Image: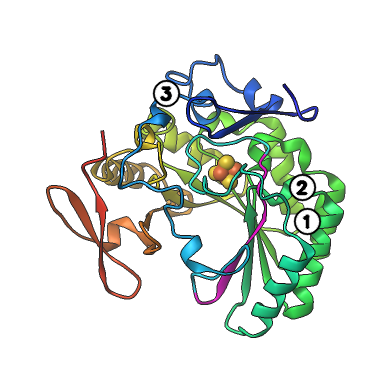
Amino acid sequence: MYDDDDVLIGVDPATRLPYGVSRYYASLAEHDDPDSDPIAAQYAPREAEGDTSPLESSDPIGDRQYEVTPRLVHHYRDRALILVNDRCATYCRHCFRRHFTGHGAGRLSAGELEKACCYLSDHPEVREILLSGGDPLMHGDEELFALIDRLRTVRDFLIRVCTRMPVVLPSRITESFAQSLSYRLPAWVVIHANHPREITGEFERAVALLLRAGAPVANQAVLLRGVNDDAETLEALFRGLQRNGIRPYYLFQGDLASGTAHFRVPIERGIELMRTLRRRLSGLALPTYAVDLPAGGGKVPIEANLVRTESDRYIFRDANGAERSYPREIER
Ligand code: SF4
C-alpha cells in the first residue's frame, strides 16, 4: 500500500508503530532482512520492538516536559524546537520521538504557530529555532518557507532545519528549494546518516545544492547495533561525510526509546570505538560521542561527562553539574 509515489505507509500489527520507507531508501538495501542488512535494519520492523522495559519511554529525551506551547519545546536556553509535522519519508525503527512521529498529529496549525510566536516574542534569550518533527521537509516549499518567514518577523533567528531527506529521499532537495533557502540565511541543515552506504551520488547531489545555497550541513548519527557498531563502518561514514563538506557533528548513544534495546550498544563499546577512531581520523572528521540523558536530563558529551560506572548504571554530570544516571542492565 502506497500513500504516494515514494512512501510506503502502514502500521506494524505487532508493535503498533508506524512504518514506511521511500522506494529510494529501500533500494539501498542489498536484501530486506533487517537482521543482516544495515539499511533494512533501519526501516523494517522486527519482533524485538515488542520487548519494552520500564526504563524505556516513548518520550526518552523529555520533549513533553519542556513543551511550552503546543509543539514548541524550549529545553536549552538559547534554542527552541518546533515540531513542524509528524510525517517522515522513512520511519526509522530507532526513532527517539516515537510518541509523536507518524501518530496523526499532522501539520503545525496556524493557531499553534501564533502561540509559538507569542511565546518566542516574550523570550529574547531564544536565538535559534530548530525545525523538526517528523521531518519538516514533508511540508511543501511554500508552506515551509512561509513558516520560516513568520518566525523571522519575531526575531532574526538562526534556523536549523533537521531533516533526513538527503539520506532517505534526496530528490526532495531541488534547485528551487535550495534557492529559496539561500534567501533565508543564516540557516543550517542537520541531517541523519548512519551508514556509508547512504552516501550515494543522489545524496551527494542533494548536499552540494544545500552547501552551494550557503547552508552549512552537519550530521547527527546514532550508534546502532548491527548498523554501524564497528570502527571500519564508522570510519567510512565519517570520511564520506567530510569528503562532501558535511560536519560529522554528533554520534549519539541510542536513546531509551521503547522497544529499541536490540539497537543499543554498551557505552563502554562506544568509548572504545571513539578511541580507535581518534587514532585513525583527523579532528575534522570526528563527531562528539554524546548521550541525551533520560527524563529530559539534556545532551552531554559521554567521554567528558562520565563520572563513574556502577554495576547497574553509568553516572554522568549534566550541564548544571548534577549527577544523573543512564541504566546499564538493559544493554544486551
Ligand atoms: S527521520 Fe527522525 S523523526 Fe523521522 S522516524 Fe527517523 S528519527 Fe524519527
What segment carries the magenta color? 77-88
**How far apart in space, not on screen, are marks 2 and 3 (Cα)?**
39 Å
Q: Which residue is mark 3?
A: 47
Give the secondary structure at mark 3: helix
In the rendered structure, which disc, 2 or 3, sits on the residue that comes first in sequence? 3
Mark 1, residues whose alpha carbon is within 10 Å: few (<14), some, or many (≥20)? many
87 is within the stretch colored magenta: yes
Q: Is residue 144 above or below residue 256?
A: below
Q: Is residue 18 above or below residue 309?
A: above
Which quadrant, please, contains the N terminus?
top right
166 left or right of 231 in image: right
Residue 189's spot in the image, x, y percent? 65, 55
Identified at 42% across, 19% down, the residue is 35
Residue 251's spot in the image, x, y percent? 43, 48
Identity, as a three-letter code, of the amino acid under mark 1: Ala
**How far apart in space, not on screen, are marks 1 and 3 (Cα)?**
43 Å
Residue 213 circle label: 1
Q: Nearer the viewer, residue 204 or 291?
A: 291
